[in-house]
Amino acid sequence: MYVLKDNFSTYVEGFLGTLQLTFYSSLLALALGFLMASFRVAPVGSLRVFGTAWVTVLRNTPLTLLFFAVLLGLPRFGLVLPFQVFAVLALGCYTSAFICEALRSGINTVPRGQGEAARSLGMNFGQTLHLVVLPQAFRSVIPPVGSTLIALAKNSAIAGAFSVNELLGTYKTINELGYNIVWTFVWIAVGYLIITLAISALFNLLERRYGVAR
């Protein structure tokens, strides 16, 4: 317990860093995932190709490699931002591919007649998707989206290797002070457990309220 007591401020700083990284990356992943899912079911061929390429490339690229590409590659092209912003970009873009596929699977569960009925009322593709299809698809994709965001929270640990303030990176500071490494990681694990359980509780609440009855 003294490891936590003596280094409480360090743990809190890392915990808040991970929390912030997870929050902003989740917002970006949800926004891009929603956009790419729209592209993948769009009637325009070029949009479908772009959405498919986005998902294929990101889902088959190791996250660590993507971190290297974003944090070390983009500054070479004149884009210089704080490392935390680069980490949000890497995590958000990577996770958006999985969010996209979860949303697309939900869209495929909506009966085709729903879209046809909307179009018969004069709705265009955008209106049909956003007003009719996605609200119904959302109900069936709550669990997989929640699981994906939990994975994002754990994947944020990679950012610590790139000078981003987050929870796992606190072990370096604490280890240099001579504290027991086992208990150092135990309290780090507790921090991640708190974050993932909070996300799980949020999506369980959403599922009970909006999910499809089984």
Image (tube, helix red, strand yellow):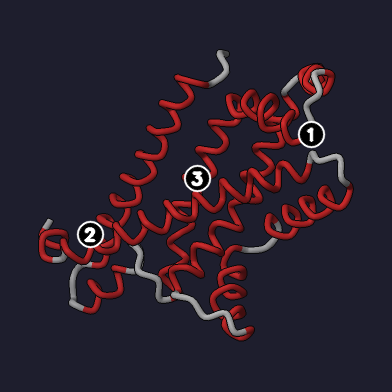
Q: What's the residue at 51%, 21% (across, down)? A: 210
Residue type, numbered disc 3: Leu
Residue type, numbered disc 2: Val
Circle 1 or circle 3, nearest the eye: 1
Number of residues whose C-alpha sits closer than 10 Å to that of mark 3, classed few (under 14), some (14–19) or many (20 or more):
many
Number of residues whose C-alpha sits closer than 10 Å to that of mark 2, classed few (under 14), some (14–19) or many (20 or more):
some
Element at badge 2?
A: helix
Looking at the image, which is closer to me, 56 or 186? 56
Mark 1 to mark 2 CA distance (whole Å): 47 Å
Position in image of residue 26 (x %, y %): 49, 50
Residue type, numbered disc 1: Phe
Looking at the image, which is closer to me, 131 or 74? 131
Number of residues whose C-alpha sits closer than 10 Å to that of mark 1, classed few (under 14), some (14–19) or many (20 or more):
some
Q: What's the residue at 47%, 65% (across, down)? A: 158
Q: Is residue 192 left or right of residue 32?
A: left
* Image vertical order of residue 6 relative to residue 112, above or below: below
User: Hey, which residue is sitting farthest right in the picture?
Assistant: 45
- Which residue has dot 1 on it? 125
- Which residue has dot 3 on it? 149
Q: What's the residue at 51%, 70% (across, down)? A: 86
Q: Is residue 75 left or right of residue 175?
A: right
Looking at the image, which is closer to me, 60 or 42? 42
* Image vertical order of residue 199 relative to residue 212, above or below: below
Work out whether mark 1 precedes mark 2 in sequence or the reverse, and give the earlier one.
2
- Which residue has dot 2 on it? 12
| Res 11 → quadrant | bottom left
Q: Which quarter of the rendering shows the N terminus?
A: bottom left
Q: What's the residue at 35%, 39% (across, down)? A: 198
Element at badge 1?
A: helix
